[in-house]
Image (cartoon, rainbow, N blue to C red):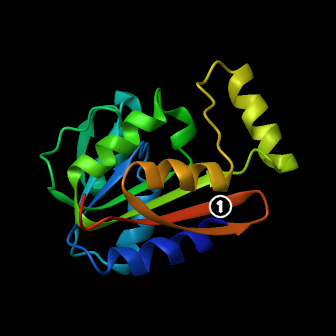
Amino acid sequence: MGTRGVGAGVGPSATRWGSSLDVGGGTAVLTRLAQDRRRDLVYHIVEPQKGMLRYARAYGEIHQAHAEDLPFEHGSVQMIMVGEALHHFVDPKIAFAEFARVLVPGGGLFIFEFDPSRTMGRFMATGERLLGEPGHFFTPDILAVMAREAGFLPNLKTRGWKYVLLGRRELTS
């Protein structure tokens, strides 16, 4: 599940919604993949590091902010994408609560991450921690539980040491 596989996962989900957040979007890699499928959507790239946003300007509206405090109104977004960034968030549980807050009922969630229970995933997690990053790596099953607790209906797709969590915000939350 390299970049091409992620693009295939983002594309079909993005085609069903009108606006999208790329949270922890850095240089807008997921936004660019989604735009390959739908150039007519409104894309927002959310990233706390100003320097990273400089590269994202060409791909959507940029917002310097943290995942735990998204600058969007309640129920104002249809899709959230997080690509290899969740482990950098200061508090992933608060970020999930923010995702649920800003997503419309039935809104989509796409998270691409590394599985720390696999050899390469453990290597990545160890490296991130040695570099001083928060290093919040979760196994697919634990991330699915976190998503459920935040009001999402999760579906996991795994391949080797990487995985995707596709979720829908529950209609009743």
- The answer to whether residue 114 is above or below residue 158 is above
Image point 18% across, 38% down: which residue? 71
- Regarding residue 39, the answer to whether it shows in the image is yes
Residue situated in front as seen by the camera: 17 or 153: 153
- The answer to whether residue 61 is above or below residue 98 is below
- Residue at mark 1: 163
- The answer to whether residue 101 is above or below residue 123 is below
Image point 61% across, 73% down: which residue? 5
Amino acid residing under circle 1: Tyr
* Secondary element at tag 1: strand
- Regarding residue 1, the answer to whether it shows in the image is no
Horizontal and vertical percent position of residue 147:
47, 53
Q: Quadrant of the C terminus?
A: bottom left
Query: Seen in the image, is 80 located left or right of residue 115?
Result: left
Residue situated in front as seen by the camera: 166 or 34: 166
Q: Quadrant of the N terminus?
A: bottom right
- Binning the other alpha carbons within 10 Å of mark 1 as few (below 14), some (14 to 19) or many (20 upward) gives many
